[in-house]
Amino acid sequence: MKDFSIHRFLELAGGVQVDDLDWDLCREVGVTDVEARILRYMSDTESHTLLYMRDLLAGHSTRDPEIIQFLSVWVYEELCHGRAIDRLLDVAGHPVSEDHVAKVAQNSAMQEFVEAALSQAAAWLTPRFIAVHMTWGAINEATAAAAYQTLGERTANPVVAKLVNRMARQERRHMSFYWHQAKKRMEGDRITQKLVEHAIKRFWTLVGSGVGGSENLGFVASHLFGEEEHRRGLRYADQLISGLPGMEWFDLVTAQTQQRARTWEQKFGPATFRTSSKLPDATQVA
Ligand SMILES: [Fe+2]
Ligand SMILES: [Fe+2]
């Protein structure tokens, strides 16, 4: 993977660009109910990035200037992702209810609280724990990039495709930061590698499973990644993470997504990803 430069990252930093998007076209084409529910899950996850940042700011990571600089920008970029998706859903006729954010935060409160307490305690215990946070972050960013990229490939709404591709690019930059931070802490250090392996195997779950809701996660897993041909992005995410020292075993992004999809389908039946009927599906055009 290409080296990461914090200076370059700060130069490129900023909220995802939305002002040049063709919002009239977006309204005209619209999004399907399936796309809307997938985008809602993504927005809920993005909008609650601050909860994750609270954990990251615990313990020894606060003494690392590069991490502090990165997080200052990162949380803003994620917030802008959430706002951009909300705007898109609003324009496309799926506005968010006023009490939605409070409801989501309430639903996730207990799980997030327990996770935060555990993670903060561990972070104070050993500086090695930063490597766990960094690996965790790399996995989540790689998963987010895969989700946006896949939605971009599947949607028939060109404005949705443009926006999610822009966000995927930013997620890849975030991923690069976490990945390089994790790598430099794990290289040649078997204890840290074992700590990361244990923590990820024991505690990691797909991004958003707390705030986005378990059932919604199953829905996204089944509709977006239900077929093998649409899991390329997930496999690539696994491949990137397995390139970290001691992480050769890693395949959890694909494995957990498939598991979630299966569980959802057992309960609700087979999933169908439908794109908007107002434009021809790009894959059907000769
Ligand atoms: Fe994001
Ligand atoms: Fe991100």
Image: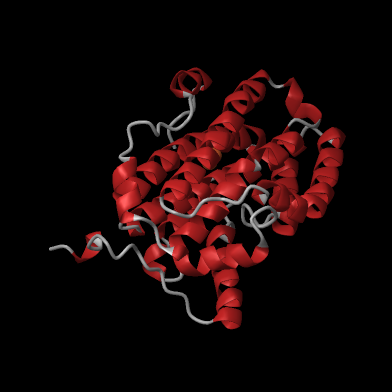
Q: Residue furthest left?
A: 286
Q: Residue 44, how many percent across, how many down?
A: 60, 49
Residue 194 lies left or right of residue 184; in this view the side is right
Q: Is residue 20 above or below residue 24?
A: above
* Quarter location, residue 138: top right
Q: Nearer the viewer, residue 188 or 89?
A: 89
Q: Residue 107, how many percent across, how many down?
A: 75, 56
Query: Residue at coordinates 49% horizontally, 51% vertically from top-left?
Result: 237
Query: Residue at coordinates 60% horizontally, 63% vertically from top-left?
Result: 216
Query: Residue at coordinates 55% horizontally, 67% vertically from top-left?
Result: 219
Query: Residue at coordinates 81% horizontally, 36% vertically from top-left?
Result: 123
Residue 215 lies left or right of residue 19; in this view the side is right
Q: Nearer the viewer, residue 163 or 140?
A: 163
Q: Residue 45, how many percent across, how many down?
A: 61, 48
Q: Quadrant of the N terminus?
A: top left
Residue 39 lies left or right of residue 259; in this view the side is left
Observer able to see residue 242: no
Q: Nearer the viewer, residue 205 or 224?
A: 224
- Ligand 2 image position (quadrant): top right
Observer able to see residue 221: yes
Residue 187 lies left or right of residue 18; in this view the side is right
Q: Residue 198, how many percent across, how many down?
A: 74, 53
Q: Quadrant of the C terminus?
A: bottom left
